[in-house]
Image: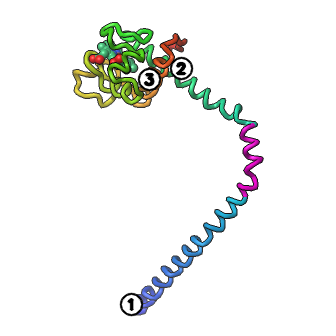
Amino acid sequence: MKLACLISGYNNPVSIKDNVKREEKHVNLIPTKTKQQVKFFNNLAPPLAAAFLLFSPICATPVSIAQTIDIQRGATLFSQTCIGCHDAGGNIIQPGSTLFTKDLQRNGVDTEEEIYRVTYYGKGRMPGFGKECMPRGQCTFGARLEDEDIKILAEFVKLQADKGWPSIETEQK
Ligand code: HEC
Protein backbone atom coordinates (compact mmCIF):
# COMPACT_ATOMS: atom_id res chain seq x y z
CA MET A 1 0.00 0.00 0.00
CA LYS A 2 2.67 2.40 1.08
CA LEU A 3 4.65 1.63 -2.00
CA ALA A 4 1.65 2.19 -4.23
CA CYS A 5 1.02 5.52 -2.54
CA LEU A 6 4.59 6.49 -2.97
CA ILE A 7 4.58 5.55 -6.57
CA SER A 8 1.38 7.38 -7.33
CA GLY A 9 2.61 10.33 -5.28
CA TYR A 10 5.77 10.29 -7.27
CA ASN A 11 4.10 9.78 -10.58
CA ASN A 12 1.57 12.54 -10.34
CA PRO A 13 3.89 15.53 -10.11
CA VAL A 14 5.87 14.15 -12.98
CA SER A 15 2.86 13.77 -15.22
CA ILE A 16 1.63 17.24 -14.30
CA LYS A 17 5.06 18.67 -15.05
CA ASP A 18 5.01 16.78 -18.28
CA ASN A 19 1.69 18.31 -19.19
CA VAL A 20 2.88 21.78 -18.37
CA LYS A 21 5.95 21.23 -20.47
CA ARG A 22 3.85 20.07 -23.36
CA GLU A 23 1.54 23.03 -22.98
CA GLU A 24 4.52 25.36 -22.95
CA LYS A 25 5.73 23.80 -26.13
CA HIS A 26 2.30 24.29 -27.56
CA VAL A 27 2.22 27.95 -26.58
CA ASN A 28 5.63 28.45 -28.11
CA LEU A 29 4.47 26.90 -31.34
CA ILE A 30 1.56 29.26 -31.93
CA PRO A 31 3.38 32.50 -32.70
CA THR A 32 5.67 30.78 -35.19
CA LYS A 33 2.72 29.21 -36.88
CA THR A 34 0.81 32.49 -37.00
CA LYS A 35 3.85 34.27 -38.39
CA GLN A 36 4.12 31.66 -41.06
CA GLN A 37 0.46 32.00 -41.85
CA VAL A 38 0.69 35.76 -42.04
CA LYS A 39 3.64 35.46 -44.40
CA PHE A 40 1.70 32.97 -46.45
CA PHE A 41 -1.30 35.28 -46.68
CA ASN A 42 0.84 38.30 -47.44
CA ASN A 43 2.31 36.48 -50.38
CA LEU A 44 -1.08 35.35 -51.51
CA ALA A 45 -2.95 38.58 -50.83
CA PRO A 46 -2.76 40.15 -54.30
CA PRO A 47 -3.81 37.03 -56.21
CA LEU A 48 -6.49 36.33 -53.57
CA ALA A 49 -7.88 39.82 -53.90
CA ALA A 50 -7.92 39.47 -57.66
CA ALA A 51 -9.68 36.14 -57.42
CA PHE A 52 -12.19 37.61 -54.99
CA LEU A 53 -12.97 40.51 -57.31
CA LEU A 54 -13.20 38.16 -60.25
CA PHE A 55 -15.57 35.75 -58.54
CA SER A 56 -17.53 38.14 -56.35
CA PRO A 57 -20.54 38.37 -58.70
CA ILE A 58 -20.78 34.58 -58.57
CA CYS A 59 -20.21 34.52 -54.81
CA ALA A 60 -22.97 37.07 -54.30
CA THR A 61 -25.58 34.90 -56.03
CA PRO A 62 -26.28 32.42 -53.19
CA VAL A 63 -26.89 35.33 -50.80
CA SER A 64 -29.45 36.95 -53.05
CA ILE A 65 -31.11 33.59 -53.65
CA ALA A 66 -31.39 33.13 -49.88
CA GLN A 67 -32.86 36.61 -49.62
CA THR A 68 -35.41 35.89 -52.34
CA ILE A 69 -36.45 32.71 -50.53
CA ASP A 70 -36.90 34.69 -47.29
CA ILE A 71 -39.02 37.30 -49.07
CA GLN A 72 -41.08 34.53 -50.65
CA ARG A 73 -41.50 32.86 -47.26
CA GLY A 74 -42.37 36.24 -45.71
CA ALA A 75 -44.96 36.90 -48.39
CA THR A 76 -46.49 33.45 -47.88
CA LEU A 77 -46.62 33.83 -44.09
CA PHE A 78 -48.08 37.31 -44.48
CA SER A 79 -50.82 36.11 -46.81
CA GLN A 80 -51.63 33.27 -44.41
CA THR A 81 -51.70 35.26 -41.17
CA CYS A 82 -51.79 39.02 -41.59
CA ILE A 83 -53.53 39.80 -44.87
CA GLY A 84 -57.02 39.63 -43.30
CA CYS A 85 -56.36 42.92 -41.52
CA HIS A 86 -53.34 44.27 -43.39
CA ASP A 87 -54.12 43.65 -47.05
CA ALA A 88 -51.51 45.42 -49.21
CA GLY A 89 -49.95 46.91 -46.08
CA GLY A 90 -53.14 48.69 -44.97
CA ASN A 91 -55.16 48.25 -41.80
CA ILE A 92 -58.88 47.56 -42.11
CA ILE A 93 -59.49 47.82 -38.34
CA GLN A 94 -57.43 50.88 -37.50
CA PRO A 95 -56.72 53.07 -40.55
CA GLY A 96 -54.07 55.14 -38.71
CA SER A 97 -51.94 52.05 -38.07
CA THR A 98 -51.06 50.77 -41.51
CA LEU A 99 -47.77 49.07 -42.33
CA PHE A 100 -46.62 52.03 -44.43
CA THR A 101 -43.53 53.84 -43.23
CA LYS A 102 -45.28 57.08 -42.29
CA ASP A 103 -47.62 55.27 -39.86
CA LEU A 104 -44.90 52.92 -38.60
CA GLN A 105 -42.72 55.94 -37.84
CA ARG A 106 -45.48 57.92 -36.15
CA ASN A 107 -46.39 54.92 -33.99
CA GLY A 108 -42.74 54.09 -33.19
CA VAL A 109 -42.86 50.72 -34.96
CA ASP A 110 -40.43 51.47 -37.78
CA THR A 111 -37.67 49.01 -36.82
CA GLU A 112 -37.53 45.26 -37.35
CA GLU A 113 -37.28 44.82 -33.55
CA GLU A 114 -40.49 46.77 -32.89
CA ILE A 115 -42.37 45.05 -35.71
CA TYR A 116 -41.21 41.74 -34.22
CA ARG A 117 -42.45 42.79 -30.78
CA VAL A 118 -45.90 43.92 -32.01
CA THR A 119 -46.29 40.72 -34.05
CA TYR A 120 -45.16 38.58 -31.11
CA TYR A 121 -47.17 40.20 -28.28
CA GLY A 122 -49.88 42.07 -30.16
CA LYS A 123 -51.00 45.64 -29.50
CA GLY A 124 -54.47 47.12 -28.92
CA ARG A 125 -56.86 45.25 -31.16
CA MET A 126 -54.09 43.35 -32.89
CA PRO A 127 -53.52 39.85 -31.46
CA GLY A 128 -50.01 38.56 -30.74
CA PHE A 129 -48.76 35.50 -32.59
CA GLY A 130 -45.70 34.52 -30.50
CA LYS A 131 -45.46 31.16 -28.72
CA GLU A 132 -45.02 32.89 -25.34
CA CYS A 133 -47.46 35.73 -26.05
CA MET A 134 -49.12 36.92 -22.82
CA PRO A 135 -51.76 37.64 -21.57
CA ARG A 136 -53.96 35.18 -23.45
CA GLY A 137 -56.60 37.82 -24.17
CA GLN A 138 -54.01 39.76 -26.18
CA CYS A 139 -53.04 36.73 -28.26
CA THR A 140 -54.42 34.97 -31.30
CA PHE A 141 -56.84 32.10 -30.77
CA GLY A 142 -55.40 30.51 -33.90
CA ALA A 143 -52.08 28.79 -34.35
CA ARG A 144 -49.02 30.52 -32.90
CA LEU A 145 -46.03 31.31 -35.10
CA GLU A 146 -42.46 30.07 -34.66
CA ASP A 147 -40.01 32.78 -33.53
CA GLU A 148 -38.09 32.28 -36.79
CA ASP A 149 -41.25 32.94 -38.82
CA ILE A 150 -42.00 36.11 -36.85
CA LYS A 151 -38.45 37.25 -37.60
CA ILE A 152 -38.97 36.61 -41.31
CA LEU A 153 -42.31 38.47 -41.13
CA ALA A 154 -40.70 41.45 -39.39
CA GLU A 155 -38.00 41.59 -42.08
CA PHE A 156 -40.62 41.25 -44.78
CA VAL A 157 -42.88 44.00 -43.37
CA LYS A 158 -39.91 46.38 -42.96
CA LEU A 159 -38.68 45.65 -46.49
CA GLN A 160 -42.14 46.09 -47.97
CA ALA A 161 -42.66 49.36 -46.06
CA ASP A 162 -39.31 50.67 -47.37
CA LYS A 163 -40.47 49.91 -50.92
CA GLY A 164 -44.04 51.22 -50.49
CA TRP A 165 -45.69 47.76 -50.50
CA PRO A 166 -45.27 46.55 -54.08
CA SER A 167 -47.36 43.45 -54.73
CA ILE A 168 -45.45 40.17 -54.50
CA GLU A 169 -46.48 36.83 -55.91
CA THR A 170 -46.99 34.29 -53.15
CA GLU A 171 -46.73 30.54 -53.44
CA GLN A 172 -49.79 29.24 -51.65
CA LYS A 173 -49.35 26.12 -49.59
C1 HEC B 1 -57.26 40.83 -36.45
C2 HEC B 1 -56.62 41.81 -37.27
C3 HEC B 1 -55.11 41.82 -37.36
C4 HEC B 1 -54.28 40.80 -37.78
C5 HEC B 1 -54.68 39.40 -38.21
C6 HEC B 1 -52.94 41.34 -37.78
N1 HEC B 1 -52.96 42.63 -37.34
FE1 HEC B 1 -51.34 43.86 -37.19
N2 HEC B 1 -52.54 45.32 -36.46
C7 HEC B 1 -53.90 45.23 -36.25
C8 HEC B 1 -54.36 46.43 -35.55
C9 HEC B 1 -55.80 46.71 -35.11
C10 HEC B 1 -53.23 47.23 -35.35
C11 HEC B 1 -53.14 48.57 -34.63
C12 HEC B 1 -52.75 48.29 -33.18
C13 HEC B 1 -52.59 49.53 -32.34
O1 HEC B 1 -51.75 50.37 -32.71
O2 HEC B 1 -53.26 49.65 -31.31
C14 HEC B 1 -52.11 46.53 -35.95
C15 HEC B 1 -50.81 47.01 -36.00
C16 HEC B 1 -49.75 46.36 -36.55
C17 HEC B 1 -48.44 46.90 -36.66
C18 HEC B 1 -48.03 48.31 -36.24
C19 HEC B 1 -48.53 49.26 -37.32
C20 HEC B 1 -48.48 50.72 -36.95
O3 HEC B 1 -48.44 51.55 -37.88
O4 HEC B 1 -48.51 51.04 -35.77
C21 HEC B 1 -47.64 45.97 -37.25
C22 HEC B 1 -46.16 46.08 -37.59
C23 HEC B 1 -48.49 44.82 -37.51
N3 HEC B 1 -49.75 45.09 -37.09
C24 HEC B 1 -48.03 43.66 -38.09
C25 HEC B 1 -48.83 42.55 -38.29
C26 HEC B 1 -48.34 41.29 -38.79
C27 HEC B 1 -46.93 41.02 -39.23
C28 HEC B 1 -49.41 40.43 -38.80
C29 HEC B 1 -49.43 38.97 -39.19
C30 HEC B 1 -48.59 38.09 -38.41
C31 HEC B 1 -50.55 41.16 -38.29
N4 HEC B 1 -50.17 42.42 -37.99
C32 HEC B 1 -51.81 40.62 -38.16
C33 HEC B 1 -54.70 44.18 -36.60
C34 HEC B 1 -54.25 42.96 -37.07
Image location of residue 8, percent across then percent down: 44, 85
51 inside magenta stretch: yes
Q: Residue at x 76, y 42 (%)?
A: 50
Q: Quadrant of the N terminus?
A: bottom left
Residue 95 position in % (x across, y down): 33, 8
Location of residue 27 by image quarter: bottom right
Element type where label 1 sits in the image: loop
Residue 103: horizontal and vertical position, in percent?
36, 16
Q: Amino acid at mark 2?
A: Gln
Q: Is residue 119 left or right of residue 30?
A: left
Could you say whether the residue bearing mark 2 is in a helix, strand or loop?
A: helix
Q: CA distance from mark 3 to mark 2?
A: 10 Å
Residue with the mark numbered 2? 72
The reply to whether discs 2 and 1 touch (Cβ–Cβ < 8 Å) is no
Amino acid, disc 1: Met
Query: What residue is disc 3 on?
Result: 153
Mark closest to the chain's N terminus, 1 or 3: 1
In the foreground, 146 or 151? 151
Nearer the observer, disc 1 or disc 3? Answer: 3
As displayed, is residue 48 above or below residue 156? Answer: below
Residue that numbered label 1 is attached to: 1
Mark-to-mark CA distance, 1 and 3: 70 Å
User: Few, some or many C-alpha atoms within 10 Å of disc 1 (few <14, some 14-19, many ≥20)?
Assistant: few
Ligand 1 near label 1 (Cβ, under 8 Å)?
Answer: no
Please tell me whether residue 159 belongs to the stretch shown in magenta. no
Whether the residue under disc 3 has CB within 8 Å of ligand 1: yes
- The magenta span reads 40-53
